[in-house]
Image: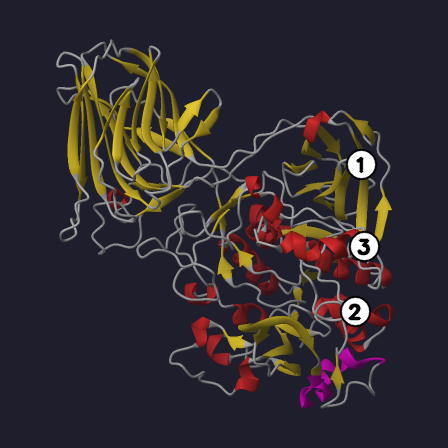
């Protein structure tokens, strides 16, 4: 485990507000704390220059450390269920196991009067039932990803325990069902029980987690009288499970298992769980789900009112390790300080966070040490859970991610990947987005930061105070409220600069019940590492249809003029100006670079991300998807490379419907909006890495600065 790390209770706070920090220090080692503001978070000694400003505060200094642990694995807990003093119990559930051969997995268990009772999957993959020391097992392995009905009975008067395992869709000659009975001395089972679903609890620690779906776990008396029956089709959007039994012994979910899952009774006729919730009465539990780490607060910062808006971190360090715990500061409420807002893509940060890439730590370690960069990576720390770019241990995709855990690959002063070009920085997320902050600071342009989470919480009101909003290098994930906020901002005459690629691509929605969690389901098409199961394409959080914004009726092309069309290696290539750069409508772009901005002239052929301005993931214009007819494509970064291919959603047959130079390209474009605003988009994920060369005096940087200065001019666009 990481020797010294932590997380915050929110992504951002306003000056004057409070933000809490949770820190874990192995062996209870003390650590030194300081606060810094990052102007450039790239640690590359050959890069634009790492720049941080120490922010003095009374909290800074030596702090006592406390060891903390992280415990992945989801389950449901019910702390008090009254059991009548009868002669026995019946435990039942329907299950869809995904790793039946992985080891013992508890489905439904309770502890009462010193006796533990468990319905479980045995180590051999078949069902088993335990009452105290007595055990009965079917001995026939269940097949993965198929539904079974399980029923276990303990009968004290008869002195027996029994178990039945029934496949709901038997397969040919495969013997995956059966029953078993044995004699057992059973004492009194009455009293108040503690119940756990999908795991067993030993004190405060859970173990023996179940992988797979569980439906309608029930505890009854021998005569069939229900004691408790948890209906997972109720409260699907929440972290609460509802008991239909007479005691209303409702429970709580732990570590964000996945709801809105098709149940054993799903007919295939309905795909929206809100229409027929009774067919979505299953929860998919995983042994590597991770929600809130639950660490106690180590210290809380009341942000001084004179701290400027920007990128910040709490830097913690001791002899065993160090970490930069990032957070973002907004201006005090009602105290806007600039006309420019940089929209920090914290939704995308969180969706990618904890991306376990086997071997990444070993790959970057030597360079990280040489550069003084952070060395810890998610592949060294799987205890903090996974990214939505990973799959669970049972092969199902990770669809829910929490911010209440150390997000070790979302840090300043960090290498995200080994850049394939000489002197390349390999930055990502905070590192490359800080190039925008560095550019603005060096250009003397005042700016505030606003995060995605702020935009989701406040809607368009978060953006209204600003004449210009700058979107970052990779703003891929947005909620409906965020998309509506951006559309309304432009509809009110705002000016938007999109300096990235692969933006506004997937829908992602946070939970109102657990606001630290974001959900996304990868429905239909798109470039993706896993696909949503059939019938499970509606989010549990909010209930909206999931997938690509293009499929949901809000394509990126309509918002910013271009949309994701090609992907390849982390290599950058130059742009070339088109004839449109001479159009009088964009004359402001070429001030001071008139000779360099001739049609056909190349620019952006160097940079700290892949070596060029057009690369990695590319966005192109397409009027069929909503690119405004008045959009001017002023430059194109065409990438003809064997490793670059089209996005899946464009492929109707095995050949692309458009010429390669029209889709394997970054289209830099401009258009005016009806309300007097405008949009400028670059269409490339490596573009911001080409701002810093030559001290931000290259053609990319000058052109982008020209655009920003015109966008700051209150004069309305035609």
> Which circle marks residue 370 in the picture?
3
Dot 1 falls on a residue whose secondary structure is loop
Do the CB atoms of the residues marked 1 and 3 lie less than 8 Å apart?
no
Q: Position of residue 330 (x, y in %)?
A: 72, 46
Rounded to the nearest angstrom, the CA distance separating label 1 from label 2 is: 30 Å
Above/below status of 398 relative to 712: above
Rounded to the nearest angstrom, the CA distance separating label 2 from label 3 is: 39 Å
Give the quarter of the image for residue 476.
bottom right
Name the side, left or right, on which 339 lies relative to 240: right
User: Can residue 617 be seen here?
Assistant: no
> Which circle marks residue 304 in the picture?
1
Mark nearest the camera among 2 and 3 is 3
Tell me which segment is drawn in magenta: 576-592
Q: Position of residue 649 (x, y in %)?
A: 43, 72
Q: Nearer the viewer, residue 454 or 115?
A: 115
Q: To which residue does mark 2 refer? A: 709
Within 10 angstroms of label 1, few (less than 14), some, or many (20 or more) residues? some
Indicate which disc, 2 or 3, sits on the residue closer to the N terminus. 3
**Was residue 404 drawn as part of the magenta stretch in this picture?**
no
């Amino acid at each position: 485990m990481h020797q010294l790390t932590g997380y915050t209770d929110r992504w951002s706070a306003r000056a004057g507000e409070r933000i809490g920090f949770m820190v874990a220090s192995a062996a209870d080692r003390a650590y030194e704390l300081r606060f810094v503001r990052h102007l450039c978070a790239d640690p590359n000694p050959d890069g634009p220059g790492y720049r941080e400003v120490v922010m003095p505060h009374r909290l800074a200094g030596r702090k006592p450390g406390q060891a903390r642990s992280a415990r992945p694995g989801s389950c449901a807990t019910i702390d008090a269920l009254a059991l009548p003093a009868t002669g026995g119990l019946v435990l039942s559930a329907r299950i869809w196991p995904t790793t039946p051969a992985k080891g013992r997995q508890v489905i439904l268990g309770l502890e009462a009067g010193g006796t533990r009772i468990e319905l479980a999957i045995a180590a051999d993959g078949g069902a088993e039932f335990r009452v105290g020391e007595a055990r009965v097992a079917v001995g026939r392995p269940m097949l993965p990803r198929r539904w079974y009905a399980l029923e276990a009975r303990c009968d004290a008067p008869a002195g027996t325990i029994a178990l039945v395992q029934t496949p709901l869709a038997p397969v040919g000659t495969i013997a995956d069902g059966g029953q078993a009975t044995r004699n057992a001395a059973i004492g009194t089972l009455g009293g108040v029980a503690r119940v756990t679903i999908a795991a067993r609890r030993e004190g405060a620690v859970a173990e023996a987690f179940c992988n797979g779906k569980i439906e309608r776990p029930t505890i009854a008396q021998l005569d069939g009288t229900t004691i408790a029956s948890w209906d997972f089709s109720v409260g699907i959007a929440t972290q609460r499970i509802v008991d239909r039994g007479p005691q209303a012994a409702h429970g709580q979910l732990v570590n964000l298992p996945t709801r809105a899952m098709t149940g054993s009774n799903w007919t295939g006729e309905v795909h929206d769980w809100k229409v027929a919730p009774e067919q979505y009465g299953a929860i998919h539990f995983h042994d590597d789900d991770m929600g809130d780490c639950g660490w106690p607060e180590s210290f809380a910062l009341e942000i001084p009112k004179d701290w400027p808006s920007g990128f910040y971190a709490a830097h913690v360090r001791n002899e065993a390790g160090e970490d930069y715990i990032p957070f973002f500061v907004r201006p005090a409420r009602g105290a806007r300080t600039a006309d420019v807002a940089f929209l920090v893509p914290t939704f995308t940060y969180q969706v990618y966070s904890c991306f376990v890439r086997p071997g990444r730590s070993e790959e970057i370690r030597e360079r990280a040490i040489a550069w003084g960069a952070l060395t810890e990576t998610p592949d060294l720390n799987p205890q903090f859970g996974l990214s939505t770019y990973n799959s669970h241990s049972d092969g199902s995709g990770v669809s829910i991610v929490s911010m209440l855990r150390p997000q070790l690959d979302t840090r300043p002063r960090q290498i995200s990947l080994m850049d394939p070009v000489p002197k390349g920085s390999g930055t990502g997320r905070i590192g490359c987005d800080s190039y925008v902050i560095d550019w603005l600071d060096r250009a003397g342009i005042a700016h505030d930061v606003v995060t995605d989470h702020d935009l989701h919480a406040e809607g368009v009101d978060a953006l209204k105070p600003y004449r210009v909003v700058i979107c970052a290098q990779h703003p891929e994930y947005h909620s409906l409220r965020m998309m509506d906020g951006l559309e309304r901002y432009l509809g009110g005459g705002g000016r938007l600069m999109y300096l990235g690629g692969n933006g506004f691509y997937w829908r992602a929605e946070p939970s109102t019940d657990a606001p630290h969690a974001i959900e996304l389901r990868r429905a239909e098409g798109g470039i993706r590492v896993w696909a949503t199961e059939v019938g499970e394409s509606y989010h549990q959080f909010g209930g909206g249809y999931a997938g690509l914004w293009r499929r949901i009726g809000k394509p990126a092309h309509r918002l910013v003029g271009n949309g994701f069309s090609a992907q390849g290696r982390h290599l950058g290539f130059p742009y070339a100006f088109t004839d449109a750069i001479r159009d009088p409508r964009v004359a402001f772009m070429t001030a001071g670079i008139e000779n360099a901005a001739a049609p056909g002239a190349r620019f952006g052929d160097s940079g700290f991300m892949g070596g060029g301005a057009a690369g990695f993931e590319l966005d192109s214009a397409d009027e069929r998807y909503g690119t405004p007819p008045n959009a001017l494509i002023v430059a194109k970064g065409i990438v003809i490379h064997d490793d670059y291919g089209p996005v899946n959603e464009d492929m109707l047959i095995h050949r692309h419907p458009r010429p390669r130079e029209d889709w394997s390209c970054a289209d830099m474009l401009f258009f005016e909006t009806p309300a007097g605003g405008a949009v400028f988009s670059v269409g490339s994920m490596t573009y911001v890495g080409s701002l810093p060369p030559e001290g931000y005096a290259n053609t990319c940087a000058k052109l982008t600065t020209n655009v920003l200065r015109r966008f700051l001019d209150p004069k309305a666009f035609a």
